[in-house]
Image (tube, rainbow, N blue to C red):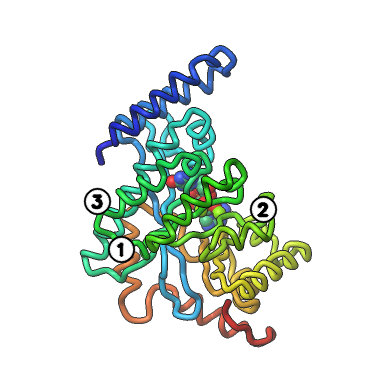
Amino acid sequence: MAVNLQSLCNWKDNYQYYNSSLNARAPERLVMENKLYKALEREEFLLYYQPQIDFRTGKIFGMEALLRWNSPDLGMVSPGTFISTAEENGLIVPIGEWVLRTACRQNKLWQDAGLPPVRLSVNVSRKQVRKEEIVRQVFRALDDSGLAPEYLELEITESVIMEDPKCVLEALSEMKNRGVRLALDDFGTGYSSLAMLKDLSLDGIKIDRSFVRDVITHPGDRGIVEAIIAMARSLRLSVIAEGVETKEQLAFLVAKGCHNIQGFLFSRPVPAEQASMILQEDGCGTGIWHAICDDVSASLAPYPAACSP
Ligand code: C2E
Ligand code: MG
Ligand code: MG
């Protein structure tokens, strides 16, 4: 997909501004910045999609779009390696716009192909939300793709709100009013207050992978996960657990009332073509994952019945 030229120009403005501190930067960082800029021009970015499953139906209700960089010299690069550099030099703005446009367009293509409609979650960096630009980007991605807003969810982290709370809240509420969903990613790992949860008018929260990982073996993590699920239920927020890798973790989460699951147990993030096949198969009969869900249901007897948040 073509890169938005205006965004690139904006980025170049930022780049000029940051030029004054170039001397202080590590050479590797400058090399990375240069490669990222070229990557955007040469369309080396792509999105992978990871299914989110409702345990009660065993079917997909959503997908998370996850950025990848297919670099000619570095191979397939994960976002953890380059997002912070892109945030520092402002390049996250045009990259983020590309992600939004690609994700909305892909979701509309799936719907037009007759696949079961799902919600697509897009990660939004705090550096993107700081600019009023984000509202324009989101609305344009929706308008140009023709995707209905309820099929787009923005995943923000607690840090988003820290920099300019008033401006961020205004931007987020404008998007909420349009019908876009808002979820708080990596919940519990930042510095947010409970009041913030209320102010943001969120639709859902995601339990961070770091808590899910040791939920079976570590009483502290178990307590945190239980508390997050209970809090989500009382605030009437939906809750998704991410990073679920084992049936034991799944059984625990379901027993505590968290039915929305994302993790390698069901699927790793996959390229768009593979995600299309997964959606296709998921739409048929009992779906792909009913065996795992049935197995875990059978093991649930020792736990008390739970109700969904
Ligand atoms: P995130 O938004 O919390 O995404 C979940 C991460 O957990 C993904 O890593 C996913 O591949 C990984 N994951 C999911 N299930 C499992 C599991 O069962 N086990 C393990 N070990 N990992 C699992 P990924 O794709 O490397 O993304 C890392 C982070 O990079 C994301 O964390 C998000 O903060 C950021 N990111 C990804 N795409 C974008 C994007 O388009 N824009 C922005 N601003 N940030 C992005
Ligand atoms: Mg996320
Ligand atoms: Mg997360």
At mark 1, the secondary structure is loop
Question: For the residue carrying disc 1, how many other residues have a C-alpha within 10 Å: few (<14), some (14-19), or many (20+)?
Answer: some
Query: On the rendered image, what quadrant is the N terminus found in?
Result: top left
Comparing 1 with 201, the one in front is: 201
Can see residue 50? Answer: no
Residue 266 at what x, y percent from top left? 48, 66
Answer above or below: position of 26 versus 106: above
Contact (Cβ within 8 Å) of mark 2 with mark 3 = no
Relative to 194, 49 lies left or right:
left
Answer above or below: position of 306 versus 249: below
Residue 278 at what x, y percent from top left? 34, 65
Q: Which residue is mark 2?
A: 192
Can see residue 252? Answer: yes
Q: Amino acid at mark 1?
A: Ala
Q: Which residue is mark 3?
A: 144
At mark 2, the secondary structure is loop
Q: Amino acid at mark 3?
A: Asp
Q: Is ligand 3 closer than 8 angstroms to the Cβ of mark 2?
A: no
Query: Mark 2 or mark 1, which has the lower sequence index?
Result: 1
Question: For the residue carrying disc 3, how many other residues have a C-alpha within 10 Å: few (<14), some (14-19), or many (20+)?
Answer: few
Question: For the residue carrying disc 2, how many other residues have a C-alpha within 10 Å: few (<14), some (14-19), or many (20+)?
Answer: some
Residue 148 is tagged as 1
Cα separation, mark 3 vs mark 1, equals 11 Å
Query: On the rendered image, what quadrant is the C terminus found in?
Result: bottom right
To which quarter of the image does residue 252 belong?
A: bottom right
Residue visible at 44% across and 62% down?
181
Cα separation, mark 2 vs mark 3, equals 34 Å
To which quarter of the image does residue 273 belong?
A: bottom left
Residue visible at 59% across and 71% down?
250
Residue visible at 73% across and 67% down?
222
To which quarter of the image does residue 49 belong?
A: bottom left
Cα separation, mark 2 vs mark 1, equals 30 Å
